[in-house]
Image (cartoon, rainbow, N blue to C red):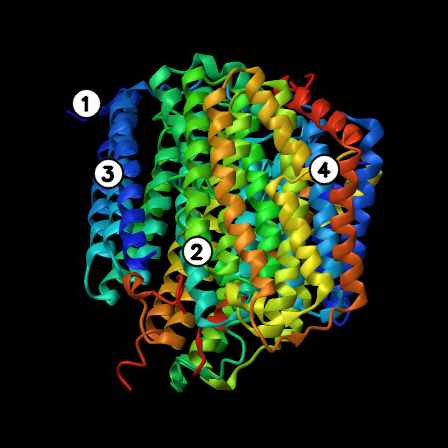
Amino acid sequence: MSLLYFVLLPLLALFLMPLYRKHLHIISVMLNLTLLTLALTCTHTLPMVERVAVDLPFAITFVLERASWLLLTLFTLIMSLVSLYHLRYGNDKALFVASTMLGVGVSGLILSHDLFNIYIFFEISSISAYLLTALNQDVKAYGGAIRYMIVGAFASLFLLLGIMLIYLSIGVLDIGAIAERFGLIEPRLQFLILLSLFIGFGIKAELFGLNFWVADIYQASRSSVGSLFSALLSKSYLFVLFHLTYLLHVSPSQLFFLGLIGALTFVAAEFSAFKSHESKRIFAFSTLGQIGIITLALSYADAMLSAAALMLILTHAVAKTALFLALDLLERHFHSSHSTIFARFHAPFLMGIIALAGLSLLGIPPFAGFVAKLSILTGLASLEAYGAVALILLISLIEAAYLFRLLTGFRQGTGKERLYVAWSHKLLLGFMVLLLLGFGLMPEPLLQLCQAAAASMLGGNHVPL
Amino acid sequence: MNLKRTLALSHLLTGLLVSVMIIALLGTLRLLTPPIDTIGETLLHINAQSTQVANAVTSVVTYFRGLDTLGEVSILFLSIFGVALHMQHSTRNLFGAHDTLLQIGAQVLFPLIVLFGVYIITHGHLSPGGGFQGGVIIASAFVLRFLAYGDHYEPSARLLTLSESLSGAGLVLLGVLGLLLGDRIFAQILSLGTMGTLLSGGVIELVYLFVGLKVAAEMTLLSQHFIKARDV
Amino acid sequence: MFDAFGSSALLHQAITLLCFIIFGVALFGVLVKKNLFNIFLAFSIAEAALFLFFIGNHYAAQLQAPILFEGLSRFDPAVMVDPLPQAMILTTIVIGIAVLALALTFVIRYYKLTGHMRIDEMDELGEDR
Amino acid sequence: MIPFLIIATLLSLLAAAVMAIYSRDPAHSVLSYMGFGLGSTVLYLLFSAPDVALTEAVIGAGVGALVFVVALLQTQNKEQP
């Protein structure tokens, strides 16, 4: 089993597209399920290290350890769910190409240990995100895509600058080797490199100050695409950012700065979500809020908190996918995503799914989101960061306020339409909610996985040369 | 939130960050000292025995960092796919010239340019050049025809996409074959030959051949879609 | 007087300075220009300035291209330029042109649909519709 | 001699960049952009990177300029029917 198959199989499926252009949706499902199976079979052989081309210590290396395995499994799972969701809507070439390439990009981002290779996968995932934004081919979509391209160009410019400065000063690209030699660089140059890498990844990971564009992009694209953005794209950039942060042993003050950015992201996003009345914008801002909490938790570089943050990544991704897919059903029916559409239909199952996923997002007891948030809070309390605990609890009230406002929308309005939801979609959405419920009731196995992953992420996972 | 205010704010923020970066950069310029032993130099050392390719840049691009090239080729594929998707239903050629002299010139030059492109691709491991450059040169021959014939010249879009896709698939299959027969992507499954001859480098030449074919088809598609106006 | 830049360190500093002036000029252009056409042109130039900076800092007077011609018989870092940066830049140039073509496609389509391509008049997204 | 050529080319590149970005006439912008591409090709040759020079010549100055020229034509023929 080679790790390169996670990149090569989707590429092969893409390049052979002219041979089966009528059945792209079926191929997409088969491909993603195959990748999910491959990811699951890797469980027993972790950690896996694979060198590309030559056996030199500094050649391109693909590494799969506990943390990246957890994310890879999550990504392939979400990709499979989203492709299953689209199965009913038939053959869509643009969606197939862009989403498959997005899968290639994010898996490459978390697997690769070579900085320039990471840049390539960064570009692959960005370009597929631009294409996904412009999927509807109307004024809104093009406006969103152009904006996205402008911020994306900034991000890749600064990432490239960071990579160039690293190669010019120490002459290596493998991130393990960079970690070894990083101390040799002049401190001011070190700061410059860290700043450019932070701008590059921070823009894409939607951190505070660099995330002014996010709501527009989510609003411009389809809701089902929003699930990919929120579950895959921002999470993979965040993972690479923190992987680099832990490897390069940044100073405590820089970690504190990251934590501050996380807290600011959280507060600003929740307030913006509260002020918004467009459901896609609300979910976008709520994604930003969760990213803020995750950044805050990861910035302590503490085993327990990092495990909790990984758990939050998993539960948030599943809950947000369910929410965005449910919203996509509504959007396809009403051709609008303003929050008033919640008062215009009657479909008990769909309403139940949205309510339950929303509750998990908020962290209400029987769901997995509760376990994640609780372990973040206890972790912060054990580090005596009571300020952060108070902040999260306080701002969560705002989160509760806007989510309940959204959900009470169901009970208002007259002359409701009955909305037909297909059985396959019911099964899919039900599966996601059951997943959340199941891990909420029996969190132990998932927590253990997350703890192992956090340990390998914090341990620096130096590749044996 | 007002969009204009958001835009102004974002400009202010990015401007602030950028100016901080620039000031910091100008201060740290003199600290940059070239490193002593880089990976590039290591690769240069082992290049002779592991690839038998006279152009070290070619061997780095296609062999040592073949995965980067695969990613780059797929980026190009993705981008051209987007261009073709959003520019389809284009009808009118922007350059509707019907200059007989230009047409004769295009007739004469077309095979010469294609030949030159093929030369650049097949000699990528001996001299400067390679798949990307040669591919674009071949595509430029088609661009010349577009300019000279206007709407009267139309290469089959199906053939172009087919050759693009199949050469891409060939590249990936070469990688998979390397994984199965050797133990790594783009492993040397062919004999290396002797350095400096046309048939040297083994897999490297095949990689550049596929890349060249793919880039030629892609760039032709790009220009075909770009130089046609679509009236909405 | 031609020996003034004889030491490669001084030459590298001059190259770096000029490239970053171009880089800064281009980024400033991105921020102040309102025409989408000029914005993407400025991005393209900023990228090119970074490439020049990277390749230029690996240049030295006694080094030759990493290709075996008649005069050279073996690969030696003492007489040849580092090939890896050149390979990286080769890759990045192609990526840059791919992104540029896609961006201009979006700009053209946006222009066809709305009749303008100024970034300060793009207001189709926002809270109220 | 070569160091001075490098510095002079860089200075002219700076001028071309300013022309390309800040010119009000898009046609001037595109022409200066082509000039920028050619200048950087020369510079790569001076930096003993012939592979990059060839790539920049065909891709940066060739395809890039083509793409810009066509974008210019496509976005202007509506105003002057």
The residue at 72%/36% (across/down) is B192
Q: Amino acid at mark 4?
A: Gly
Q: CA distance from mark 3 to mark 4?
A: 47 Å
Q: Please indicate, yes or no, whether residue A362 appears anywhere in the rendered image.
A: yes
Q: Disc 3 designates what residue? A: C21
Q: Please indicate, yes or no, whether residue B217 appears anywhere in the rendered image.
A: no
Asked which secondary structure carries label 4, the reply is loop
Q: CA distance from mark 2 to mark 4?
A: 67 Å
| Chain ID, mark 1 | C
Quadrant of the frame with the N terminus of chain A: top right
Looking at the rendering, which quadrant does residue A31 occupy? bottom right
Residue nearer the viewer, A51 or D61: A51
Q: Amino acid at mark 1?
A: Ala
Q: Nearer the viewer, mark 2 or mark 1?
A: 2
Looking at the rendering, which quadrant does residue B96 occupy? bottom left
Q: Are marks 2 and 3 in contact (CB under 8 Å)?
A: no
The residue at 46%/44% (across/down) is A270
Q: Disc 2 designates what residue? A: A276
Q: CA distance from mark 2 to mark 3?
A: 42 Å
Residue B102 image point, x, y percent: 40, 80
Q: Amino acid at mark 3?
A: Ile
A41 sits to left or right of A287: right
Please determine if labels 3 and 4 lie on a single subunit. no
Q: Disc 4 designates what residue? A: B193
Vertical position of residue B131 compared to residue B97: above or below: above
Residue C4 numbered mark, or none: 1
| Chain ID, mark 2 | A
Q: CA distance from mark 2 to mark 1?
A: 62 Å
Please determine if labels 2 and 3 lie on a single subunit. no
| Chain ID, mark 4 | B
